[in-house]
Amino acid sequence: MLTAGQYRFAEFKPSPIEGAKYTAPSWAWMNTVAPTGLMFYTGSEFPTWKNNLLVPRLSRGSLWRMTVNGENIVQAEELFANDRVRARKVVQSPSGRLYLLTDEVNGKVVWVKNAR
């Protein structure tokens, strides 16, 4: 397991995988994110988010919105950073609404609405 580009335990030495090619990541966080799912947004509630990658964060309870251009992430925005509700999953309904599933003893489904 890598954390901030280093193995969590100094004595851990993974076996090399024959024929494997490694490349640098196109995006990395400085802190643990613990992503619990990925979703490309295609709804109409948030027009500027169209085709953005949404990443729920379990470790601190936020939602990342990643603006993607081809294979590159060109911008990242952390949403709900002060709410501290662990986000388990993000989904879009057939009608285009956006929902978060929280990871609590009595978890809840949160409808994310545009406050226009």
Image (tube, rainbow, N blue to C red):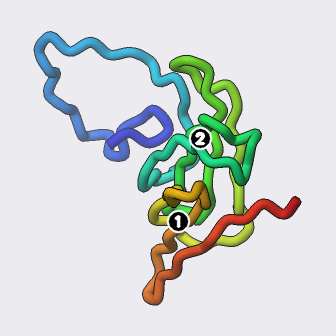
Element assignment for label 2 = loop
User: Which residue is depicted at the point 66% across and 32% down?
Assistant: 67
* Label tally: 2
Above or below, comparing residue 41 to residue 17 in the picture: below
Q: Nearer the viewer, mark 1 or mark 2?
A: 1
Element assignment for label 1 = strand
Quadrant where the image shows the N terminus? top left
Q: Quadrant of residue 41?
A: top right
Q: In front here: 26 or 39? A: 39
Image x and y of residue 115, in percent: 84, 63
Q: Which mark is residue 30?
A: 2
Residue farthest toward the bottom in the current orientation of the protein: 106
Q: Is residue 22 left or right of residue 96?
A: left
Q: Is residue 108 left or right of residue 114?
A: left
* Amino acid type at mark 2: Met
Image x and y of residue 69, in percent: 62, 21
Q: Residues within 10 Å of mark 1 (few under 14, many from 20)?
A: many
Quadrant where the image shows the C terminus? bottom right
Q: In front here: 41 or 7? A: 41
* Amino acid type at mark 1: Ala
Above or below, comparing residue 8 to residue 67 in the picture: below
Q: In front here: 114 or 101? A: 114
Q: In front here: 33 or 93? A: 93
Q: Which mark is residue 55?
A: none
Q: Earlier in the sequence, mark 1 or mark 2?
A: 2
Instruction: Tell me the residue that label 1 is attached to.
Output: 87
User: Which residue is depicted at the point 42% across and 35% down?
Assistant: 6
Give the spatial CA distance, label 1 vs label 2: 19 Å
